[in-house]
Amino acid sequence: MQSNYIGDQVRIFALRSSTAYLGEQLNKLTKEAASGEVADLGLRLQGDTVVLNNLENRIALIEQYEKNTQDAGFALKWQQQVLTAASDSSVEFANKVLTLPQAYDPVAVDELVQEAAEKFSIIVDQLNRDVSGRYAFSGQNVSERPLRSPNDIIGKMSEIVGQATSADEIFQKISVWFDTETNGEGFDGFAYNGASENNIRFSIAEGETVNIGISAIDPEIKNMLKGLAIAALADHVDLGDDNVEIGRLLKNGAREIWNNEVNLIQRISAIGAAQEEVERGEVRNAAVLSELTTARNDIRRVDLYETSSAILETESQLRNLYLLTARISSLSLADYLR
């Protein structure tokens, strides 16, 4: 009788092992049905994961390109906004000055001087704006604020002018200071804190890069600042309340702005072209990423019909095992002897 008892225990153990195995299979199949992806990817690929790894690596690369296009697009958008607003504002001011009548009205002249100082201050502050931890007009040195404060710049210009009492002399001295680029003696050395090198290239797609570098001492920007600064300086120099000389200084500054406007517009257009490159990169990345993701998903995807059939079959096998296990477990000695 002992051998029969041991044999029954072995059968029960075997049934329980089968039940556990089928339970695991059912859990795996249920997860596959819920996620739509195969649970045992290694078994699906039979250990050959090279293709899948290549797909994953390319997907990660394209996702980095997408991040680069977002960063580049954000920087270019800010540059476009700042320079467009600066161009519109400075040209509006220049037009007002250049259309002044020869008989300068003291009130109008004073208002224009104050307007020049206000516009100069606003534009410098915009160029100095920190956008997401980066200064967009500092060349490669994006961690450094590009320009000193408007007051510092105007104060330095007042020192350079010294005892000059004519608009032409003041204009000449300030022009030389702005145009001097060596030995740290000019505007660049005093007012600019960024890097002279502004080549900042972003990889935005496979085989495509875009340069987003720009600095506040690029000629198109510096000449606009020079024009406004010269006009604003009229409130900080001694011209003996001579409205004619003050008006002449205003017009000297306005002509600098006007003569530079074409160059500034071309620079703004170049930024717009870079934005278009970034947009094309975004479209290309989206298309490639869609293809790669589809290919990866095809490898991982399960056949939901086959999975559902397997679930039903496994559930049926489990029910049969439960019934058989219950019958053996409740078998009495009298039932066994019959």
Image (cartoon, rainbow, N blue to C red):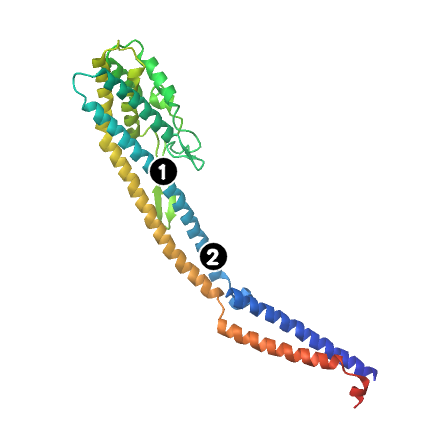
Task: Say which quarter of the image contains residue 266.
Answer: top left
Name the one closer to the observer, 158 or 219: 158
Q: What residue did someone put label 2 on?
A: 56
Q: Is residue 28 above or below residue 183?
A: below
The disc labelled 2 sits on which kind of residue? Glu
Which numbered disc covers residue 78? 1
Name the one closer to the observer, 225 or 52: 225
Name the one closer to the observer, 186 or 276: 276
Left or right: 258, with 301 as reference point: left
Looking at the rendered structure, the number of numbered marks drawn on it comes to 2
Mark toward the start of the polypeptide (1 vs 2): 2
Residue 121 position within the rendered picture, expressed as x and y whole percent measured from the top left: 35, 25
Q: Is residue 55 above or below residue 152?
A: below
Task: Say which quarter of the image contains residue 258.
Answer: top left
Label 1: few (<14), some (14–19) or many (≥20) C-alpha neighbours in 10 Å:
some
Q: Residue at x 27, y 20 (%)?
A: 111
Left or right: 99, with 113 as reference point: left
Disc 2 is placed on an element classified as: helix
